Amino acid sequence: MLIRSWIVVIALAQATQPNILLFLVDDLGWQDTSVPFHTEVTPLNERYNTPNWQRLADNGTKFTNAYAAGPVCTPSRTSLLTGQSPARSHITYWTLYKGQDTSKKHPTLTPPKWDLDALQPGELTLPSLLQDAGYHTMHVGKAHLGAVDSPGGDPKNLGFDVNIAGHGAGGPGSFYGKHRFMATRGKMDFENHQIWDVPGLEKYHDQEIFLSEALAIEACYEIEQAVETGKPFFLHFAPYAVHAPLMPNPKYIGKYKNIDKREAAYATMIESADAALGSVLEQLEKLGIADNTIVIFTSDNGGLSAHARGGKAHTHNAPLRSGKGSAYEGGIRVPLIVQGLDKIASVSDANVITHDLFPTILQYAGIDVPEDHVIDGIALEDVQSDRVIGWHQPHQWGASGPGIEPFTAIRQGKWKLIFFHADERYELYNLETDIGETKSVIPHFPLIFKKMRSTLLNWAINREAQPSILTETGEPVIWHE
């Protein structure tokens, strides 16, 4: 069924270039939907209300082993637009100001020289390739693709014809129009502008409107404008939700009275993001273009769990371990649903990762990957069961918790190997029997460990991954064979 689904999608795409809607939610965990991605429905699935994401699953392919390219935002977001692993691009951490290293200080390690400003004009990107092929390209919402005060901070310099509300910062000042989406939200000090203030939404200032709703209105308008051009369109719709600050949407808060207030706020943010996609799907139907529009839904990293949430830290992605910023599954495993033109429901357990969407989207549009552009992504229909995917974050994230430290990791089949840089520690897990990564099995599977260690070394070397630096000696951490 799955193979037939992809064949139909590609055949239709070759006949006429389809519209492509990419809905990229921020910090949305694997369990942060009413759509079950695990083998069974979990309490978190039962808590959240996401009928529009369920609608996609009912008419598309649900990927149960999908991963973000990194455990924080910028590396994943840029990998989607370049097709390259962060290990290869050296965009291994989140950006803010031009030339600024945002890494938290580590007791014994220093980050390598990474690409502090992230994507910049002149670099080959997915929207630029689509643009060259006749697509009208639009960005709505969070960008966080290049440093704030650099040209790459503006998505229009990276291949987008339209940019609504996107800039170089990674979170909103506020989700409320009455706060003008500014970071001074509680003080209502509208003269004190900060880097987190969401740009370009002045028409919604001082209104009782939630940010996700305002962005949905803008997305619907831009779709209508795109249809009038007569061109196929690519819409990169990336709501700032569910990134902090956790702020409740009054429209939905009444449904969540019996849980922790912070968790209730989080649940309303999830429902708001789902409703935003629902508005766009309705617009596609209204304009008569739904049958020629491919819809992709995913997240840029695992769900936040180390801070800001209610209840016990590091448990909000259960049965996965830890959350955003971590090498463990809670930090990198994400929802992914692809609704093709055929609208056939199916489930795939293939190991896939963010940068696979680069060649996949080009394939939908009938565009070849340029021969001189090296990519790590594989079109979803071509993924084999033995493929290796990997992660490389030689940085200390701002929070602390399980697996939140500089690391390199790979997954092949059911096996996952993590190399923690600080103490050169390896951990091996069988994710089929221990999805929660509760106990490393290196002593029980020495041959598997040896093979996976060699594979990790080759993966890192082939991508010229830069290891952490030992602060005391100035020497790089050694990849051990």
Image (cartoon, rainbow, N blue to C red):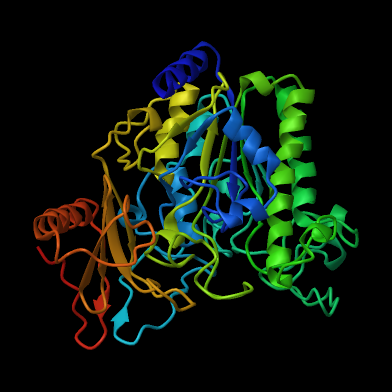
Residue 83: percent from left, percent from top:
39, 42
Q: Is residue 61 left or right of residue 356?
A: right
Instruction: In this rendered view, identify the residue nearer to me: 185 or 71.
Output: 71
In the rendered image, residue 175, in percent from the top left (x then y), is placed at 76, 62
Q: Is residue 319 left or right of residue 454?
A: right
| Relative depth, front residue between 167 and 283 | 283
Who is closer to the viewer here, 441 or 344? 441
- Rendered position, 322 above or below 433: below
**How far across and how far down the image is residue 260, in percent?**
71, 71
Indicate the quadrant containing the N terminus: top left, top right, bottom left or bottom right. top left
Answer left or right for 267 relative to 28.
right
Q: Quadrant of the C terminus?
A: bottom left
Q: Residue at (34%, 87%) from the top-left corner?
A: 107
Residue 138 visible within the image:
no
Picture quadrant of residue 51: top right
**Image: 85 above or below 62:** below
193 on left or right of 293:
right
Q: Is residue 400 visible?
A: yes
